[in-house]
C-alpha cells in the first residue's frame, strides 16, 4: 500500500466510527490536523464539536498537530483540546512521534485525522499511526465513503 493512501476516507469527521476505532482497532488517541480538518471553510461545525465531545466521553486522548503558526483561538476554546503543537513540520516523523510521547501512547494506538495526503496521511503512515483522510471533494470518493458507512453498520465485505 502506498504511504500516501489513508486507511479510511470520509467527507466529514462525524462520519468516523469511534466504536470501530476503539473496539476493533484498539486505538486510544486521536491526532487532528486543524485547518481544513477541524476547521472547514474557516468554520467549526456543530457535528465536529459533538464528535470531539463523544471522543472524550469514550476515553480517547486528543491532540492537535498543525503546520500553521496561528490557529483560530475561538475554535480552540470551543473544542477544549489540551495538547497542541503548532508549526509542526509535518510530514516529518518527529512531530508525530513527539506528540505520541506527549499523549503517552504508542504510535500504533493513535489515529491521525487530516485533509492533506502529503503532510497528514504520508506522515501518519510513516510514523506507523492509523491514517484517516477527510477529503473536501464530495463526489470523487463517494463510493469509498459509502463503503465506510456500511462498515460502520457492520457490513464489511462489499464488491
Ligand atoms: Mg489541513
Image (spheres, rainbow, N blue to C red):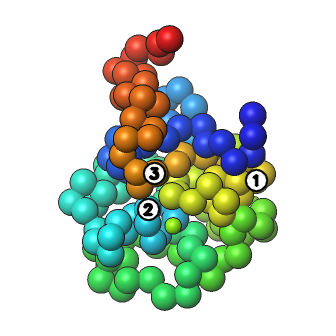
Q: Comparing marks 2 and 3, which lies closer to the viewer?
A: 3
At 57% from the left edge and 69% from the top edge, which residue is drawn?
Answer: 65
Q: Which residue is mark 2?
A: 37
At 77% from the left edge and 51% from the top edge, which residue is drawn?
Answer: 126
Q: Comparing marks 1 and 2, which lies closer to the viewer?
A: 2
Rounded to the nearest angstrom, the CA distance separating label 2 from label 3 is 8 Å
Q: Which mark is residue 127?
A: 1
Q: Nearer the viewer, residue 137 or 37?
A: 137
Between discs 1 and 2, the one toward the N terminus:
2
Disc 1, disc 3: CB below 8 Å?
no
Q: Nearer the viewer, residue 36 or 106?
A: 36
At 70% from the left edge and 75% from the top edge, which residue is drawn?
Answer: 89
Secondary structure of the residue carrying numbered label 3? loop
Beta carbon at label 2 within 8 Å of ligand 1: yes
- Residue 88 image point, x, y percent: 66, 77
When the figure is inspected, residue 6 is found, relative to residue 124, above or below; the finding is above
Q: Which mark is residue 35?
A: none
Rounded to the nearest angstrom, the CA distance separating label 1 from label 2 is 20 Å
- Residue 32 image point, x, y percent: 50, 61
Q: Quadrant of the N terminus?
A: top right
Q: Which mark is residue 135?
A: 3
Residue 89 left/right relative to 79:
right
Between discs 1 and 3, the one toward the N terminus:
1
Secondary structure of the residue carrying numbered label 1? loop
Between discs 2 and 3, the one toward the N terminus:
2
Name the residue furthest front: 140
Would you say residue 85 is visible in this rendering? no
Q: Quadrant of residue 37?
A: bottom left
Would you say residue 120 is visible in this rendering? yes
Beta carbon at label 3 within 8 Å of ligand 1: no
Disc 2, disc 3: CB below 8 Å?
no
Label 3 neighbourhood size at 10 Å, few (<14), some (14-19), many (20+)? some
Amino acid at each position: 500500500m502506498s504511504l500516501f493512501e489513508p486507511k479510511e476516507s470520509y467527507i466529514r469527521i462525524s462520519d468516523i466510527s469511534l466504536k470501530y476505532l476503539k473496539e476493533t482497532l484498539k486505538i486510544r488517541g486521536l491526532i487532528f490536523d486543524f485547518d481544513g480538518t477541524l476547521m472547514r471553510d474557516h468554520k467549526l461545525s456543530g457535528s465536529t464539536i459533538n464528535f470531539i465531545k463523544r471522543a472524550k466521553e469514550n476515553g480517547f486522548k486528543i491532540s492537535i498537530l498543525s503546520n500553521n503558526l496561528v490557529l483560530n483561538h475561538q475554535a480552540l476554546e470551543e473544542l477544549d483540546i489540551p495538547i497542541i503543537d503548532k508549526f509542526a513540520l509535518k510530514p516529518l516523523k518527529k512531530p508525530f512521534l513527539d506528540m505520541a510521547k506527549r499523549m503517552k501512547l504508542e504510535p500504533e494506538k493513535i489515529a491521525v485525522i487530516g485533509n492533506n495526503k502529503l503532510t497528514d496521511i504520508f506522515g501518519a503512515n510513516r510514523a506507523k499511526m492509523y491514517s484517516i483522510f477527510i477529503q473536501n471533494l464530495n463526489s470523487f470518493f463517494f463510493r469509498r465513503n459509502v463503503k465506510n458507512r456500511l462498515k460502520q453498520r457492520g457490513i464489511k465485505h462489499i464488491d
